[in-house]
Amino acid sequence: MIEDKAQVLWVDDDDPERFVYERFKLQKEGFFVTWARDVEEAASLLASQKFDAMILDQMIAGNGVDEQYVIWAGCTLLQWLRGAPPSQRQPERAWPKLSRITALEQNRHLPVAILSAYHDPEVLRAIYSASDQDKKPLFFGKPVNDRELLEFLRGACPKQKTA
């Protein structure tokens, strides 16, 4: 039953089929994973559905976003979620929906792990400044280490029921 499982939002422009094994492991451990493939899809979900944790890719293409802003996508979504102003290098026009909707209050302090194969110092500084809880964000590299991912989610969702 979905209501019994901890709700995890996984935001990544990669096809969900790339992470079949990881999603299977999460489901087996009592997590229900909702997939979002771009910033605006994730924002819509965060504005309408409560989640217990989020796995967030740093670089998210999609919806015609200029290539130069793809590196800022995960950071932009995190800053929007926390209610922090966007970094100066992020044009609001790249993700216009973010100015029209707000995240559910229950999602504002959602535990977030950043998933990325690429790290940019300027983007990392912006991520650290999203909120007090993001001063030391948890980063996972790609390919994903499923044990590390489960450890993060167990800590983030201590009340999840195992399947």
Image: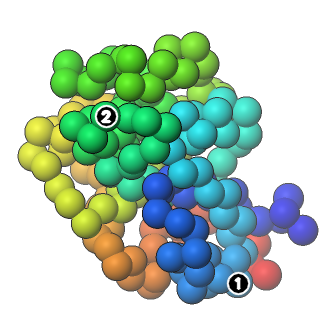
Q: Disc 1 residue type? A: Lys
Q: Position of residue 48 (x, y in %)?
A: 73, 33
Looking at the picture, does residue 61 appear above or below residue 106?
below
The residue nearer to you, when weighing 34 against 1, is 34
The residue under label 1 is: 28
Q: Which mark is residue 109?
A: none
Element under label 1? Answer: helix
**At which x and y percent is residue 20?**
59, 80
**Is 75 on the left-hand or right-hand side of 120?**
right
Q: Which residue is label 2 attached to?
A: 66
Above/below status of 151 relative to 44: below
Which quadrant holds the N terminus? Answer: bottom right
Number of residues whose C-alpha sits closer than 10 Å to that of mark 1, classed few (under 14), some (14–19) or many (20 or more)? few
Q: CA distance from mark 2 to mark 1?
A: 38 Å
Locate residue 95, reporting x and y percent.
Answer: 44, 26
The residue nearer to you, when weighing 48 against 134, is 48
